[in-house]
Image (spheres, rainbow, N blue to C red):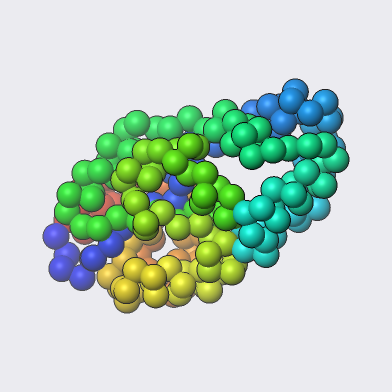
């Protein structure tokens, strides 16, 4: 294994699980009676969700804002249920993350807000089990990927230098953001190509 690599960081949605936003929207629409497009406009087209990813709200402020954005009551249980319904964990990728963790510490970095961070044990317990306190949301760093601030904040929390970290994400712009600060990065498309890339670094 390349001695310099001390931590491998995984994205969540699109790497450790499938995240199907239309399923989340449909669950919210069915529970509230609000039209799908009104939810899309209120949460995504308005910039509200992006602001949450960037850490502009605390968890409770975010939840209250979510309610206002779609114009219907959304309590924590409904928010959790809709988010969880949209996610299908990929068991093969969770197994791979566990295998890597046997060799070097692993972490997770997802573009998400503080409410997801608080509710990870309910939404995606495998993530908590694998990554523990190193399951990070972008909101903790006051910005969202691919901003350099997120990656520098991550490195600070990990106590690592850029060359000591590998990063895996399904979006090219996030891979480029990591590479811009000197982190070795891979765009995830499938397990086979990821395993080949990890093997180049002696992992897992």
Give x and y (percent) for residue 180.
47, 73
Residue drawn at the location 42% of the way across and 47% of the way down: 188
Give x and y (percent) for residue 203.
20, 52
- What is the quadrant of the N terminus in the image? bottom left
Q: In this view, does 111 lie to the left or right of 196?
A: right
Q: Is residue 135 left or right of residue 200?
A: right
Report which quarter residue 58 is drawn in: bottom right
Give x and y (percent) for residue 49.
69, 52
Give x and y (percent) for residue 161.
32, 76
Residue drawn at the location 33% of the way across and 38% of the way down: 94
Q: Can residue 45 be seen in this view?
A: no
Nearer-the-camera pick, 91 or 122: 122
Q: In this view, does 34 lie to the left or right of 142?
A: right
Report which quarter residue 3 is drawn in: bottom left
Residue drawn at the location 40% of the way across and 38% of the way down: 125
Q: In this view, does 161 lie above or below 13?
A: below
């Amino acid at each position: 294994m390349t001695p310099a690599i001390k931590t491998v960081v995984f994205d969540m949605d699109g790497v450790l699980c499938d995240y199907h936003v239309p399923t989340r929207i449909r669950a919210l629409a069915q529970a509230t009676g609000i039209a799908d497009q009104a939810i899309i406009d209120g949460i995504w087209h308005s910039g509200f969700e992006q602001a949450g990813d960037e850490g502009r709200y605390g968890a409770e402020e975010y939840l209250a804002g979510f309610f206002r954005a779609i114009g219907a009551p959304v309590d924590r249980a409904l928010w959790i249920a809709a988010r969880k319904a949209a996610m299908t964990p990929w068991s093969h990728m969770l197994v791979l993350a566990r295998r890597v963790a046997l060799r070097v510490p692993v972490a997770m970095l997802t573009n998400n807000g503080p409410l997801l961070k608080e509710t990870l044990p309910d939404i995606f317990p495998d993530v908590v089990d694998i990554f523990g306190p190193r399951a990070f949301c972008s909101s903790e760093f006051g910005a969202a990927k691919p901003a350099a601030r997120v990656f520098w904040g991550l490195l600070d929390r990990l106590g690592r230098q850029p060359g000591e970290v590998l990063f895996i994400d399904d979006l090219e712009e996030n891979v480029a953001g990591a590479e811009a600060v000197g982190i070795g990065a891979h765009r995830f498309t499938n397990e086979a190509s990821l395993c080949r890339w990890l093997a180049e670094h002696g992992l897992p």
